Image: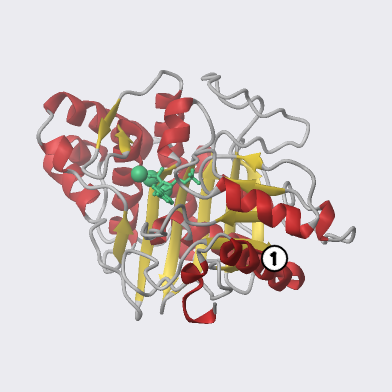
Amino acid sequence: MSSSSSALPISSPELTVALSAVLRASLATTQIFKTIPSSLTKSDKSPVTLGDFAAQAIVNTLIAKYFPDDGIVAEEEASALREDEQLRGKVGELVKMALEKDEQSLTGTKESELPSGSKKWSAEDWEQSDRFLSALDRGNFNGGPSGRFWALDPIDGTKGFLRGGQYAICLALVENGEPILACMACPNLPYAVSDEKPKEGDRSGVRGDGSVFIAVKGKGAFHRSIAPPSAAFEPIKMNSLSGGLSSASFCESVEAGHSSQGTNARIAELLGISSPPVRMDSQAKYASVARGDGDIYLRLPVGDGSYVEKIWDHAAGALLCEEAGGSVSDCSGKRLDFGKGRTLSANKGVVVALKGRHTEVVEAVKKALIEEGRGNLLGEQK
Ligand SMILES: Nc1ncnc2c1ncn2[C@@H]1O[C@H](COP(=O)(O)O)[C@@H](OP(=O)(O)O)[C@H]1O
Ligand SMILES: [Mg+2]
Ligand SMILES: [Mg+2]
Ligand SMILES: [Mg+2]
């Protein structure tokens, strides 16, 4: 594996920029996490905080600077900030703080190792609300099946972020409908095995350091501690499950409204799994499974399955798991199609398991859904 950059195990300008972007964004979110963040309610009734806005503005600014021709499919947009001067000011301060941070002391990459940017960025420019708001709104790209674009969830697990649980900053580069590069910061997911996860609601954050994950298609998945910047990335692999599927542990969302916990319990029973599910917010679930903290991630639709998953909720996590030896599909076993636009409209639900065990898990998923009278979620394959 080539290693021209001191900080990264894979030489890639896109990865160098992605790591800088998510680590800068996590500077802003960890600062806000310490206090109980206030939130606004979006038109779909879901929450958004100044952390979500700041993280998206930070990441989009860096993508715009280094890859100005790339589209970005990101979750948030700036209209609420255009109407609220006070909130806009607070977000602007966070953006400035994060973008001014010295590169090497944050990522371990020398400034000179970054690709040449389209224009010299100046921190002061981003205090001007127009530029900062337009950076945020660069996330309105529609995606699609051809060419390349970025998928960004500035804070995945906003409900977890508000509750004092897990959350993740998730960035992926998608090419011809498939994620080819992923970078995910999990500021509350301890890097060291010996570090306990903070209790939910503990706003002092993680004991020790959080974790950051990277993956490049065909080149593997890696993690390191978020700090210090000199920390090396180590390869990660899913558990080999030599004890069989019954020894597996599975994880699911904390939010009962985001996936069907009852169906998961039946699937666990069908697979002979007796340990209770590990509930966790955000794509930290994908990251945990990728590095062997858990084995299976189940996200089956609730009710009639009318909710359509968003590409930014899965692009980075799916590549991490695939590069760590996993298979990622919907509940019928079909690969996730990231080329359908901003949503995963061709898929229902998500099932993640070790490659050699995935078919067996999908069979249990199908059986459980059919038993519940929800075989229609399996599409033509039911
Ligand atoms: N009914 C639903 N079914 C599945 N996912 C949902 C949902 N409503 C919201 N979500 C998504 O669930 C994500 C959080 O996942 P999890 O429950 O695993 O922590 C949210 O991401 P955001 O927090 O970025 O908005 C949101 O996009
Ligand atoms: Mg959201
Ligand atoms: Mg999300
Ligand atoms: Mg989000």
Position of residue 102 relative to residue 297, above or below, is above
Residue 100 seen in the figure: yes
Q: Is mark 1 within 8 Å of ligand 1?
A: no
Q: Position of residue 345 (x, y in %)?
A: 37, 69
Mark 1 Cα-neighbour bin, 10 Å: few <14, some 14–19, many ≥20: many
Nearer the observer, 344 or 379: 379
- Residue that appears at 16% across and 36% down: 81
Residue of label 1:
361
Residue 290 seen in the figure: no
Position of residue 72 relative to residue 347, above or below, is above
Q: Position of residue 220 (x, y in %)?
A: 66, 66
For this orientation, the residue located farthest to the right is 243
Q: Quadrant of residue 159?
A: top left
Nearer the observer, 370 or 347: 370
Position of residue 311 relative to residue 291, above or below, is below
Q: Amino acid at mark 1?
A: Val
- Residue that appears at 53% across and 40% down: 281
- Residue that appears at 47% across and 26% down: 163
